Image (cartoon, helix red, strand yellow):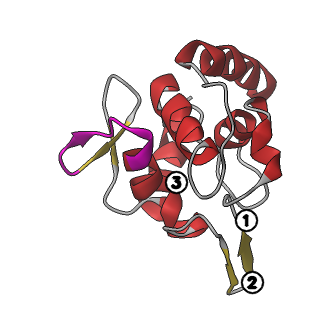
């Protein structure tokens, strides 16, 4: 478990510079405190790779997929799974983002960047998926 905490802190440093982990809440915090909205989580954690406009990027041997007008986001389970487990070169954020932060950022990307998907993800939905993720990783 100690090694997992170290890896999470390293991922926060590498993939989201200027972001620190909250001690007890296990949620990402910015310079002014916990990130309270999906937009804030996206800005501090996601946009460095997926770009401010959500169109992704390719370069330096890496591909960061577009979230803009992405049909894979139609199913709310898919982005929750990807955020919790990671995918390709994307690190997992299970244990780094709170269930609320995962729900908020998934809802944000599903309703921005040309996406207009309905049906909000709840923290309870994320928690159910996170429990499954944690069982797989043990």
- For the residue carrying disc 2, how many other residues have a C-alpha within 10 Å: few (<14), some (14-19), or many (20+)? few
Position above or below: 117 against 12: above
Name the foreground residue: 107 vs 60.
107
- For the residue carrying disc 3, how many other residues have a C-alpha within 10 Å: few (<14), some (14-19), or many (20+)? some
Q: Is residue 38 magenta?
A: yes
Q: Give the labeled residue for mark 3.
A: 11
Please indicate whether residue 119 sits to the left or right of residue 39 in the image: right
Q: Which residues are magenta?
A: 31-39
Specify whether residue 115 is in view: yes
Q: Are marks 2 and 1 in contact (CB under 8 Å)?
A: no
**Rendered image quadrant of residue 35:** top left
Position above or below: 120 against 93: above
How many numbered badges does the structure rendering display?
A: 3
Residue 36's spot in the image, x, y percent? 32, 35
Q: Secondary structure at mark 3?
A: helix
Q: Nearer the viewer, mark 3 or mark 2?
A: 2
Tell me what residue is drawn at x 46 percent, y 33 percent: 101
Q: Secondary structure at mark 2?
A: loop
Q: Is residue 46 magenta?
A: no
């Amino acid at each position: 478990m100690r090694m997992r905490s170290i890896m999470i802190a390293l991922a926060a440093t590498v993939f989201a510079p200027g972001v620190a982990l909250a001690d007890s809440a296990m949620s990402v915090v910015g310079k002014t405190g916990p990130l309270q909205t999906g937009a804030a989580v996206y800005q501090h954690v996601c946009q460095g790779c997926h770009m401010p406009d959500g169109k992704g990027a390719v370069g330096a041997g890496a591909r960061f997929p577009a979230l803009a007008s992405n049909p894979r986001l139609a199913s709310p389970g898919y982005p929750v799974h990807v955020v919790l487990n990671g995918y390709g070169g994307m690190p997992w954020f299970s244990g780094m983002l709170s269930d609320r932060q995962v729900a908020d950022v998934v809802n944000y990307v599903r309703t921005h960047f040309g996406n207009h998907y309905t049906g909000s993800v709840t923290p309870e939905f994320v928690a159910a998926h996170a429990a499954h993720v944690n069982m797989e990783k043990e």
